[in-house]
Amino acid sequence: AIWMTQSPSLLSASTGDRVTISCRMSQGISSYLAWYQQKPGKAPELLIYAASTLQSGVPSRFSGSGSGTDFTLTISCLQSEDFATYYCQQYYSFPRTFGQGTKLEIK
Amino acid sequence: EVQLVESGGGLVQPGGSLRLSCAASGFTFSSYSMNWVRQAPGKGLEWVSYISSSSSTIYYADSVKGRFTISRDNAKNSLYLQMNSLRAEDTAVYYCARDRGDYIWETFDYWGQGTLVTVSS
């Protein structure tokens, strides 16, 4: 299985800040990486796939980059609705695996 | 509008069985691969199982292999997960999730609201 190290696990920030979340793979996965947002009591929502392609309807303040083993999710100007938990996920091989999650909280 | 609605969760004793269902609507169900993903209380996400559009390709997580069986009925637009020999560590919200296409190098674009499975005596 491909192991994923997502960091940080907790991120404190303020509205308007720019934040980045990282995801590192135990082996190369080309660009087969997705990012999800999950709010309490809700199902995850797809933000980005293929490492950098924005899912339809997702605000442009979200962006993704990277390939191979190192990936980044950036939120350029935090809005109140962005405070949530974020997960990276690889779909290069089975078992599909998720990062441990990053909880983005209000500072 | 794509909709995925899970049902069948509940309280079951260790060693027991449960069958989850996912009713799909708003898209051509038979053209998409489907998955089950679970989340234990207060924990992260764990992929459980995958089935291709024609049921020809199926994968399971090691943690459920030999105990869970995924299946689908394209005529009924429905996905299923038969869970046997349930353990306390199977306690989780189970989500039905659609792949973006019918290709193993795809990811989940739509999710249901989830159904809670609690394994406890």
Image (spheres, coloured by chain):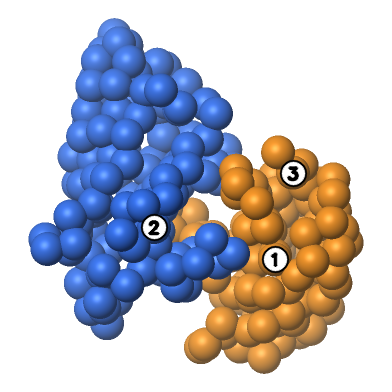
Q: Colour of chain B?
A: blue
Q: Colour of chain A?
A: orange
- Look at the numbered disc 2 and give the secondary structure of its residue: loop
The quarter in which the N terminus of chain B is drawn is: bottom left
The quarter in which the C terminus of chain B is drawn is: top left
- Look at the numbered disc 1 and give the secondary structure of its residue: loop
- Look at the numbered disc 3 and give the secondary structure of its residue: loop
Say which amino acid is labelled 2: Ser
> How much space separates mark 2 and mark 1, taking CA atoms?
18 Å
Give the camera-side residue of B74 and A96: B74
Disc with the residue nearer the chain's start (3 vs 1): 3
Picture residue at 29% right of the left edge, 21% below the top: B84
> How much space separates mark 3 and mark 1, taking CA atoms?
12 Å
Residue pointed to by mark 1: A32
Say which amino acid is labelled 3: Ile
Residue A22 image position (x, y, % from top left): 84, 60
Picture residue at 65% right of the left edge, 51% below the top: A93
Q: Chain of mark 2?
A: B
Q: Chain of mark 3?
A: A
Picture residue at 65% right of the left edge, 66% below the top: A34
Residue pointed to by mark 3: A2
Residue pointed to by mark 2: B52
Q: Chain of mark 1?
A: A
Q: Quadrant of residue B64?
A: top left
Q: Are marks 2 and 1 in contact (CB under 8 Å)?
A: no
A18 lies above or below B112: below
